[in-house]
Every structure is written in structure tokens, then in C-alpha cells.
Image: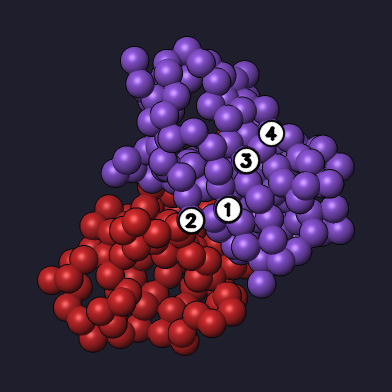
Chain colours: A purple, B red
Amino acid sequence: QLQLQESGPGLVKASETLSLTCTVSGGSISSSSDYWGWIRQPPGKGLEWIGCIYNSGNSNYNPSLKSRVTISVDTSRNQFSLKLSPVTAADTAVYYCANYGTFTGRFDFWGQGTLVTVSS
Amino acid sequence: EIVMTQSPATLSVFPGERATLSCRASQSVNNYLAWYQQKPGQAPRLLIYGASTRATGIPARFSGSGSGTEFTLTISSLQSEDFAVYYCQQSNNWPLTFGGGTKVEIK
């Protein structure tokens, strides 16, 4: 079964760059037909899709974040990453990585999530 | 961007009762609609995809229906473990969008 694990700093200063990595196990990004995505959830609020990337590097982003977001993939490490810059307090959230079925349109497997707090 | 609107925001239900949750899309998403359950401190869990297909391991008391712009998630007889927040998500168009969620609480 696929497992995903987010990693990265839990505290980022305002105006700097949030960087997170998702490590995938139990399956190969390079041989998968899935997209690999990031979703976030501010404390006490709902889910917000950030973006998705395919193993070829083809990506789609939330228009509201597109100017600040970069998602990349490293198939040799079986990882994909999120960069968000510059950040503000409004970017404080739990960040989840998940796989997204290209043909099913669903997020099947999720990481446990990691809280990133933006400090002033 | 397709806006997903869920109602009600909070649903109070007695254990054993039926719960009906609604999700409306601002334009047709065909049947590209998924439902997720989220409990406090946990990641969301896929319940339903394709508007009506239960994901692996999901109990039969969960059912989804609808197409186009109107969708429903029904929990036929609420168990204690079903009290949680439920989200719908469309995948008919990029950008992917989620509804605001419905919290199902014990009455």
C-alpha cells in the first residue's frame, strides 16, 4: 500500500520560503499514472488544493497561489516537493501531500500532514 | 473555477439516525465528485468517488448519489465513529476544488 510522508521546517519567517518534501513508499512515482499533490488546511478551516505534478513534471496549480508556488518532482528519490514564497501569516496551515488518480479524480492516499507556522 | 458549496455547515444527529449531506457545484462536474471524511488531528480519508462508488473498505452505510451540480452523501445509520467533518471535491476541471465541509455532530 502506498505511504506518503511530509517533511520540512515547522516554522518559517514571514516573507521567506516554505519548503516541504513528500517521500513516497510502497510505489514508484516514475512508473505511476497518478499525479502527486499538495493540499493545505489552516487551523480550524477547510481544505485548500495547492497543486499537483505528474512524473513528467507537468503541473497544475491553484490560481490563487500560482504566482508563489512551485511543485517539483525527483523520481530518483521517489519524492516531490513544495515551495511557497513569500509566505505570510495566512499561509499557516497543516500541509498534506497525497496521490491524485489521473483517471479517477480522487486523492487515494494521504500523508499524515505537517503543521507549518509562519512567524512575524 | 468551480465553486463547491456544502450544506448544512453543521448537522446534529442522534446515533443510529440517518444523515444526509449536500454538495452543490457552481457548474456541472458530471460525476467527477468525491467525498472525504476527516476526524480531528487526522488526514482526510476517501469515502466515495465517481459520485457513488465506495472506496475500498468503506462500510455500506455510506452512499453517494447525484450528478451534474447536485450531490448527496447519505449515512444510513450513524455510528459513533462517523461523527466527523465531511468534504466534497470536484475533479471535472482544473483547478480542483473542495467544498467548505459539513460537520456531523452528536445530538
Q: Chain of mark 4?
A: A
Residue denoted by label 2: A112
Q: Position of residue B11 (x, y in %)?
A: 23, 63
Q: Earlier in the sequence, mark 1 or mark 3?
A: 1
Disc 3: CA contacts within 10 A as few (<14), some (14-19) or many (>=20): many
Q: Secondary structure at mark 2?
A: loop
Disc 2: CA contacts within 10 A as few (<14), some (14-19) or many (>=20): some
Would you place residue A18 above or below residue B15 in this image?
Answer: above
Q: Chain of mark 3?
A: A
Residue positioned 61% across, 56% down in the render: A4
Residue positioned 69% across, 61% down in the render: A25
Mark in front: 4 vs 3: 3
Q: Are marks 3 and 2 on the same chain?
A: yes
Looking at numbered disc 1 in the image, what kind of residue is underneath it?
Gln
Left or right of B78 on screen, residue A2: right
Residue denoted by label 3: A21
Residue lying farthest to the left in this orientation: B107
Left or right of A74 on screen, residue A87: left
Q: Which mark is residue B91?
A: none
Residue positioned 42% across, 64% down in the render: B37
Residue B31 falls in image quadrant: bottom right
Whether the residues at callouts 1 and 2 have beta carbons within 8 Å, the answer is: yes
